[in-house]
Amino acid sequence: MTLYRAHLLWSASLAEVGEVADGALVVDEAGRIMASGPFDEMAARHPGSEIRDLRPHWILPGLIDLHVHLPQYESVAMDGLELLPWLNTHIFPAEARFADASLARRAARRFFRDLLSLGTTTAVVYSTIHQEATDAAFQEAESCGIRAAIGKVMMDQNAPEALSEDTEASLQESDELIQQWHGKAHGRLMYALAPRFAPMCTPALMRGVGTLSEKTGAYIQTHLAENMDEMAWVKKLYPECANYTDVYRRHGMLNGRTLLGHGVHLDTAERAMIRAAGATIVHCPNSNAFLESGVMPLRRWLDEGLSIGLGTDVAGGPTLSMWSEMAMACTVSKLRFALLSEANATVKPVEAFHLATMAAAKGLGLEVRIGSLDKGMDADFVVVDPRLTDPAERIEDTADRVLSRLVYRADPRMVQATFVRGKQCFIQGS
Ligand SMILES: [Zn+2]
């Protein structure tokens, strides 16, 4: 048993945080949180435990990135194009290079290490169409200790020559990877089927994805209503469907384990469909700004009761940092208020933090395992030094103010250590 002594901070609800100023997280050998609370009380209740005094650092639940593309990491920050030309110019050539499995392995190692160094403990990841590269990504995730849902991208129409797949082979390879990895490493590794988006998936592929998800419990991750040209293309390809969301619904891809990236331009009927299916929208504000896709009305859709998490969408977004993503979620909500005079549009750091932890865990159906610091959960947490975000270097301040600085003024060195299932996967300076 180990007691980690620090200021504990977690999301208690959309609008509130919980905290214990001089707290302790009690973690057992299996990497589970046995208890958390005031240090004195925890120390008395667990005599003989090893004590790791982390003061004046703070402990927060690990951050959850619900949408990120591993093979695109090397193509971050390539500015100047909207979604479809950007995919053709920068992204597809980069993804084609993942036919080389050793290149893919090196890229995966760097990618997961950088995620952990930023305090991200869980990531939902797109690989490429390549089975071997995807397998290598799983192996690297397994050895570095991160929690991840990963999926081989699926594209069987309108894709460039080097990235085109046969429908049956695509489903078969995904199924093999599911059998190999879904639920492995004590549930730390999961599979997320990854049909890229409707324009590049045939009805047969989408139906196959829905069936595989039902059969195996694997997640489904895809893109939805991100960009105007993309939406016009979908309308042309699927005229019989009521809207973009209906393309996925009709082909069996909308269920409680579906993660829908973006959803910037959804109408009322689509949002009702998503709510009814229990699917989750992954808001990616950095990407939506970078690729000039639009600004999702986050506040309004939260108020409607939609399940929403956050994703960096690298390389649509230029950074792997979920701190930056939380800041951008707040910032663009302020812009909606300022530019569109949309009443009550703003989202606060405490709310963004909720989306990046508890709400994301719920979207994954993992709210009893991750996203908070409660007893019985897996010990996925991040140790931060808030002084690095504060010109006054205060050791203690109100939780709201500390969180606001962590979000808006994230410092690359502020993450001191990152733990997943009680195992230290990153330490600052290493
Ligand atoms: Zn994406």
Image (cartoon, rainbow, N blue to C red):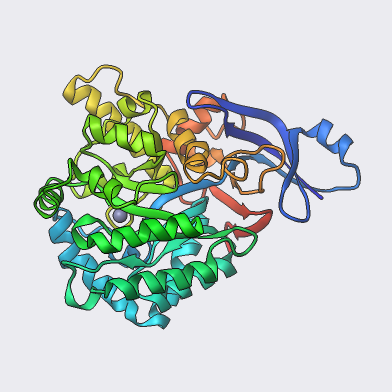
Corner quadrant of residue 47: top right
Place of residue 155 in the rendered image (x, y in percent of width and height, measured from the top left): 26, 67
Question: Can see residue 338?
Answer: yes
Horizontal relation, residue 146 to residue 241: left or right: right
- The percent position of residue 230, horizontal first and vertical second, equals 15, 51
Ligand 1's image quarter is bottom left
Q: Who's the residue at 32% across and 48% down the image? A: 261
Q: Is residue 303 above or below residue 265?
A: above
Residue positioned 33% across, 65% down in the render? 153
Q: Position of residue 86 (x, y in %)?
A: 17, 60
Q: How many marks?
A: 0
**Horizontal relation, residue 129 to residue 22: left or right:** left
Image location of residue 343, percent across then percent down: 26, 17
* Left or right side of 336 for 403: right
Q: Is residue 39 above or below residue 128?
A: above
Seen from the viewer's position, the closer of residues 157 and 377 is: 157
- Outermost residue on the top side: it is 343
Query: Quadrant of the image for the C terminus?
Result: bottom right
